[in-house]
Each structure stands twice: as C-alpha cells, then as structure tokens.
Image (cartoon, helix red, strand yellow):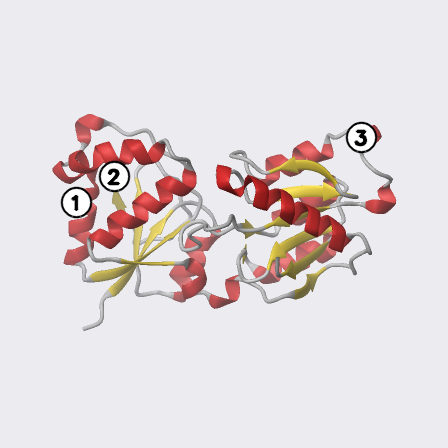
Amino acid sequence: MAGRLAILAGGGALPVALACAWPGALRVVFDGVAHDLEPPTHAHRFERLGELFAWLHRHNVDRVVMAGAMTRPPLDPTAFDPEMQSIAPRLVAAMQTGDDGLLRFIVSLFEERGFAVMGAHELLPDLTAAEGALAGPATHPGVAGDTARAAEILRTVSPLDLGQGCVVEAGLCLGIETLQGTAFLLECTSRTPDSLRPPKAARGLLLKAAKRGQDLRVDMPVIGPDTAAQLARAGLAGAVIEAGRVMILDRDRCVAAFARAGVFLLARRL
C-alpha cells in the first residue's frame, strides 16, 4: 500500500490550500505555532521530534511537505526526548548558519529517517507561473533595466543568505528584503523621501527571486494578494517574480488585487 502525505503546517494560506488539494494528508501542527487549518489536526512539540518521527511511521507516512509561516520557536531542553537530545548539538550548529542552513538541516533529519521531503509547488503545480504578464497594467520601458539591476543585487547578496526581494527604481536600490520580510521592505520604501527618489514617471519595482542554490522544497519565495496594495502605497509600478521559482498564493485573488491596485505582476526568467 502506498504511503501517506503529511503536511507540517505553519500559518497562512498555503497549508490550507495543500489540505484542500490533498484531503487524505495528515495535518501536523506544532505547539506555539499559529496555523489556519481546520480539524482534524495533530499537535506535536519541537522538543520531541523523536516522537513525531515514530508517529509518522506508525501512520504510514512516507512523504512530508513543510508549508506556512513559522518562526524559530524557543526550545525547552528539559523536555527533549532521547532522539532530540542526540540531535541537539547538530541543531545548535545549524542554527548559527542562517535560515538556509537550518532548513537544509531539518530536511536532512527527515530524509535520514526515510521520509521524502516534497515541495508545495510539486504538489500544487499552479503555485508558480510561466514567463509572461500576469496581472495589472502594461509595464513601462524601464522595467527591463530595473529588473536586471535588482537581479544583479540579489545574486550578489545570495551567498550571505539574506532575503529574496529587492526594490529598484530607475537603477537605484531602495531596499533589500531581510528577516523582517517583504511587507516591511515595502513599508520602508514608502517612507523614502521624494528627494531621494527619481521622478515619479520612473516608478520602480519589487523583484522576488529565489536565492542561488536555495532548496525550493522548503523555502520558495512567495507573493500574495496583500502585496498589491503595499506596492501601491510604496509608489511602485509593480512586481516582477522569477518564473517557475516563486509561489503565488491564492492566484485569482492575487490577480484581482493587482488589477484593483493598478500595479503590474510579471513573471520573468532571470
């Protein structure tokens, strides 16, 4: 008999979409981590990963998908089960390497125990977009140059394991996404004095793209409906996403939101 899929869920719409598309999947949530899944869900503690691995095997799980927003939780070493105690030294080392290194370590834990780690985009193929215009008004002539400049910036900082977004306007970098996320980047952009920005005729853009060598199964960039209004408030013309390597959450709502806000959404190969 074929094994089952387990959704290891954080917050947001992506775990919900996966649960709807894969109704037979087990829905695993974690103590202290907000989620939006409807019951039935199965709660586990990060401190007791050994119990989680055993529970997944008992329920014939052979594939897992990690989806949704999840911050690094505080861990209580006194609650570690024996397997977590054996993992702890490697976990501490991985936590010093940045998000990409930590996620790679977590993937390796599941793979070492016989689980295939799937990407949400492998289970929901419509999450990503082929190259082309997706929503909103036509782009202006400066988009190609600003996209190339933003891509160059993200390639340069990629080895430092920083963010997956960059705002460029008339060739000038107005900000790079870091730990605070895209909404914070766009809020900061909106506060940039007009004296530091080019004329409004040359409105800039947000580029969202995967880091080089990034494991897209567990850390693919995301854009969603809320980004449209944030772009408009920041005085930007729109967003460019890397074709095939950025997830679009709730695509119909996203397309409608970009059209309503009067900003473009474009997918390009980088």
Label 3 neighbourhood size at 10 Å, few (<14), some (14-19), many (20+)? Answer: few
Residue 133 vs 174, above or below: the answer is below
Q: Is residue 80 visible?
A: yes
200 or 17: nearer the viewer: 200
- Residue 78 occupies which quadrant of the picture? top left
Q: CA distance from mark 1 to mark 3?
A: 55 Å
Under tag 1, what secondary structure? helix
Q: Which mark is residue 196?
A: 3
Quarter of the image that includes the C terminus: bottom right
Tell me which label, 2 or 3, sits earlier in the chain.
Answer: 2
Mark 2 Cα shell of 10 Å, populated few (<14), some (14-19), many (≥20): some
Residue at numbered disc 2? 45
Outermost residue, bottom side:
1
| Circle 1 residues within 10 Å: few <14, some 14–19, many ≥20 | some
Question: Label 2 to label 1, Cα distance in Å?
Answer: 9 Å
What secondary structure is marked by label 3? helix
Identified by mark 3, the residue type is Leu
Residue 51, disc? 1
**Type of amino acid at the residue the image marks with label 1:** Glu
Spatial distance from mark 2 to mark 3, Cα to Cα?
48 Å
Residue 164's mark?
Answer: none
Q: Amino acid at mark 2?
A: Arg
The residue that appears at 20% across and 54% down in the rendered structure is 56
Tally of marks: 3
Residues under numbered marks 2 and 1 in contact, where contact means CB atoms less than 8 Å apart: yes
| Front-most of residues 157 and 25 | 157
Question: Is label 1 or label 3 in front?
Answer: 3
Q: Position of residue 77 (x, y in %)?
A: 21, 27
